[in-house]
Amino acid sequence: MPAQSPARAKTDLEIDRRTHTIRLTRVFDASRAQIFEAWTQPVQVTCWWDAAGGPLTACEIDLRPGGAFKFVTKSHPEMPFAGTYREIAPPDRLVFEALGATGRVVLRDVVGKTHMTVEIECRSAEHLDQYLKSGVDVGTSQTLDNLVTYARRRLVAVS
Amino acid sequence: MYNTSANRLSSAFHALSDPTRRAILARLVSGEATVSELMEPFELSQPTISKHLKVLESAGLIEGGRDAQRRPRRLAPLAMKDIADWIEPFRQQWESRFKNLDAHLANIKKREK
C-alpha cells in the first residue's frame, strides 16, 4: 500500500533518485494507437501539450529516428520543448531526447483502457533537480531555497 | 552526519523512493507509532522495519528517540511539507497536460462515432 498522491490527482509522480528518473503514470480511456497518435501528430499535440490550456503557437514533428521536434507554447515562446526522436514503435513505445534528458512514453493495454507511463531519465542527480525546476513557473525556486535553508538549520542542530 | 545540504536533499529523495517507506510515512501522517505498531499492518519483521526507520530518520523525514524498540516515531512535518511544495508545481504541470490530453482523446472518440 504505497502512499498516494492527493485523491483528486489522477497523475501519479514517482522520483527514482538512483536512476535519476521521474516517472509519471495515468490511465486513459482510449486505445494505445489513439494515444500514440496524440503524441506524434502535430495537429493533435497542438491541442493538449500546453499545460496552460491554449493551443501551441508552433508544433514541428519529423517522426523518424534522429528526426527533430519542437513544441512552442504561447506563454513561454522562449522555452520550447525541443529534441530528437530516438525510437518510434507504435502503438506502445516512443523514445526521445529533450532538454538533455531521455523521455520514454510507454503504453500498456489494461482492459479497454490504456495505462501510460512517461519516464524522464536525467543524466545526474543535479540534472534531475534542475529538470524539476525547469519550465515550472516562479515560486518553485523559492521553495527550493526554503528547503536548502531547512537542511542547513538541521545541519547546525545535528553537529 | 550530512556533508552538504544537497546530500541531505538527496538522502530525503532516496528515502522516499521506496514504497514501504512511503507507506510508513503515510501511516505516520495519522499519528505517531512504535516499531511494533508499525510491524503489524506491513507484515514486516522488526529488523526490516527498523532498517527502513533508520533510513527515514537519517534523511530527516521522521523523528524519534534513541531506544529503537519503544520510542514512538513521528513525522518531521517541515521536511515533508518542503519536499511536497517543491515537487507539486512540476506534478501539477503534468497533471494539467494529461487532463488536456484526456479531454482531447474524448473529443476524438466523439468525432469517430
Image: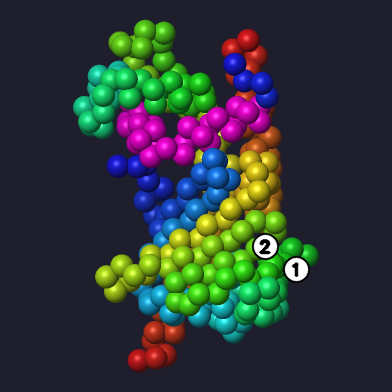
The residue stretch that appears in magenta: B5-31
**Chain under callout 2:** A
User: Where residue B86 sits: x, y (%)?
Assistant: 58, 42
The earlier-in-sequence mark between 1 and 2 is 1
Foreground label between 1 and 2 = 2
Quadrant placement of the N terminus of chain A? top left
The residue under label 1 is A77
Q: Is residue B93 in view?
A: no
Prevailing SS of the magenta stretch: helix
Identify the residue at image location x=52%, y=57%: A119
Colouring mode (rainbow / by chain / secondary structure / one colour): rainbow
Work out whether residue B22 or residue A54 is closer to the camera in this orientation and state it. Answer: B22
Residue of label 2:
A98
Q: Looking at the picture, does residue A89 appear above or below residue A10?
A: below
**Residue A95, position as x, y percentages in the image:** 57, 66
Q: Quadrant of residue B44?
A: top left
Query: What's the residue at 46%, 39% (across, down)?
Result: B17
Whether the magenta-drawn stretch holds residue B29 is answered as yes
